[in-house]
């Protein structure tokens, strides 16, 4: 009896050990398979707005011209490479909409208003290296290319698409709000602090154009609503209320550099605005990308710093 008990105990221990070992093996994470490119490099059609010419070119060649136009080609390669990933993503996402196809019968155009900037004359070795280094890489959310937004300088803190662009057409949970990237430590002085003075009659016309309502004589201005990052989302000008992003565009986005305002008032027949940053502040900040590139961050890490829960897929070899 005692012997049988010992045997049964030994058998149970052996089975228990085997089961434990089996459980351990089942719990060990399986190696993630390397992602396979989904196809060959696309050829796209491009409308040259200045000449009316239409030409076909490989998408990677096109991306070189975009990166050279959208970012200083002398900046660090990894910053240029992060821009390349977004430019490639923007291209595919916007080709899918078919808007330029309706206008010109092509996939893309060289107009900033219609598509994105394109200046092949500015391409240098750094740009070529940056594009080749990220060849085929596209940012996706739920397997769809994202809205690949970026701005020159987010003033040290990023905005959601709703706050910075008043964009509500479809959900963009991948845009991060409140990201602090330290870009003000290296950006141009005019991005750290700027001021614009605009005659009230010009402002009145801009507000009417943006809202369809006449604000009347403009003697006062105030911020009605600020977003989570501190940007002016809604502004009262005279008797009218206007969205911050819409007012910036109506007054001129080069003059009113951002909606990250520190001052807004009417003085001496002029609307006075002061603030920091340059651009809408949504998505990647170019000056922040430069700073992170100088710190040794990879292009992919830079992109993921600014976007939530996204995947970077290599879609062609």
Image (spheres, rainbow, N blue to C red):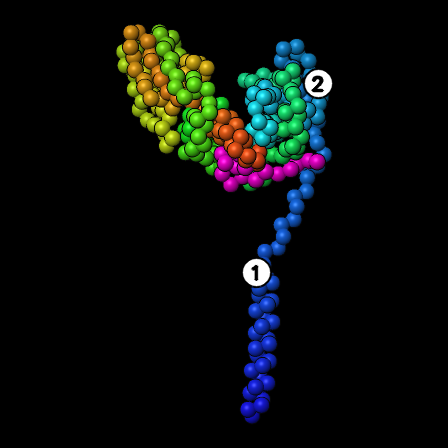
Q: Residue at x 57, y 64 (%)?
A: 24
Left or right of 116, for residue 198: left
Instruction: Look at the image and say whether residue 313 sits in the magenta stretch.
Output: yes
Residue 98, given in percent of the width and then of the height, sits at: 61, 25
Residue 89, given in percent of the width and then of the height, sits at: 59, 31
- Residue 196 location, quadrant: top left
Q: Residue at x 71, y 23 (%)?
A: 57
What segment carries the magenta color?
301-317
Residue 143, given in percent of the width and then of the height, sits at: 58, 39
Relative to 304, say whether 90 is above or below: above
Looking at the rendered image, the quarter that the C terminus falls into is top right
| Crowd class of label 1 (few under 14; some 14 to 19; many from 20; radius 10 Å) | few
Instruction: Work out whether mark 1 precedes mark 2 in sequence or the reverse, and give the earlier one.
Output: 1
Relative to 40, say whether 257 is above or below: above
Dot 1 and dot 2 residues touching (CB under 8 Å) = no
Mark sitting on residue 55: 2
Q: Mark 1 highlights which residue?
A: 27
Instruction: Look at the image and say whether residue 241 sits in the magenta stretch.
Output: no
Mark sitting on residue 207: none
Q: Nearer the viewer, residue 31 or 205?
A: 31
| Crowd class of label 2 (few under 14; some 14 to 19; many from 20; radius 10 Å) | few
For residue 12, say whether it is visible.
yes
Relative to 37, say whether 248 is above or below: above
Q: Residue at x 57, y 35 (%)?
A: 298
């Amino acid at each position: 009896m005692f012997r049988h008990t010992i045997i049964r105990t030994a058998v149970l221990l052996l089975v228990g050990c085997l089961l434990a070992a089996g459980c351990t093996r089942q719990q060990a994470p399986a190696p993630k398979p390397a992602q396979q490119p989904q196809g060959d490099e696309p050829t796209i059609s491009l409308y040259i707005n200045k000449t009316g010419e239409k030409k076909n070119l490989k998408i990677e060649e096109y991306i070189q011209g975009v990166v050279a136009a959208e970012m200083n080609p002398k900046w660090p390669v990894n910053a240029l490479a992060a821009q390349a990933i977004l430019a490639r993503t923007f291209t595919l996402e916007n080709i899918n909409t078919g808007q330029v196809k309706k206008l010109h019968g092509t996939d893309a155009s060289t107009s900033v208003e219609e598509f994105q900037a394109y200046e092949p004359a500015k391409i240098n070795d750094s740009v070529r290296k940056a594009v080749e280094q990220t060849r085929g890489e596209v940012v996706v959310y739920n397997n769809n290319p994202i809205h690949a937004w970026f701005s020159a300088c987010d003033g040290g803190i990023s905005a959601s698409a709703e706050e910075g662009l008043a964009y509500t057409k479809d959900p963009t949970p991948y845009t991060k709000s409140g990201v602090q990237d330290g870009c003000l430590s290296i950006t141009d002085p005019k991005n750290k602090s700027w001021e614009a003075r605009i005659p009230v009659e010009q402002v009145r016309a801009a507000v009417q154009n943006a809202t369809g309502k006449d604000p009347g004589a403009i003697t006062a201005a105030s911020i009605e609503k600020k977003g989570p990052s501190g940007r002016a989302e809604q502004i009262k000008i005279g008797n009218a209320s206007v969205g911050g992003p819409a007012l910036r565009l109506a007054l001129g986005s080069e003059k009113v550099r951002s909606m990250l305002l520190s001052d807004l008032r009417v003085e001496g027949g002029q609307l006075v605005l002061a603030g920091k940053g340059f651009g809408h502040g949504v998505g990647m900040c170019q000056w922040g990308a430069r700073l992170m590139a100088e710190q040794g961050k990879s292009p992919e890490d830079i992109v993921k710093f600014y976007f939530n829960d996204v995947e970077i897929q290599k879609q062609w070899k």
